[in-house]
Image (cartoon, grey):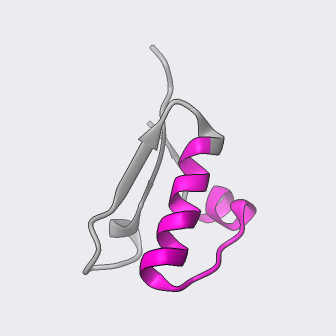
Amino acid sequence: MVEAHKLDCESVSDTCRFIVQSEDEDEAVELAKNHMSEIHGQELTSEELRDEHLQIV
């Protein structure tokens, strides 16, 4: 079974239901960074997202 990398706003926001899931960790992190910047106006680093929010499913 292939692992997927998941990041979701639901884990930190009760108003946003954005979820990104990909077999490619870099792709998942990049999409999450773009979402956080464009929708929430927050600039998070790839390392912050990996350390604090990335889930392996």
Eyeballing the image, is 39 above or below 22?
A: below
13 left or right of 2 in image = left
Asked which quadrant contains residue 39, the reply is bottom left
Q: Residue at x 52, y 55 (%)?
A: 31
- The answer to if 46 sits in the magenta stretch is yes
Between 52 and 46, which is closer to the camera in this rendering?
46
Between 19 and 14, which is closer to the camera in this rendering?
19
The quadrant of the picture occupied by the C terminus is: top left
Magenta residues, start to end? 27-52
Asked which quadrant contains residue 21, the reply is top left
Which x, y percent locates residue 9?
Answer: 39, 68
Eyeballing the image, is 23 above or below 55?
A: above
Which x, y percent locates residue 32?
Answer: 52, 60
The quadrant of the picture occupied by the N terminus is: top left
Q: Main secondary structure of the magenta part?
A: helix
Which x, y percent locates residue 37?
Answer: 54, 76
Q: Residue at x 52, y 86 (%)?
A: 41
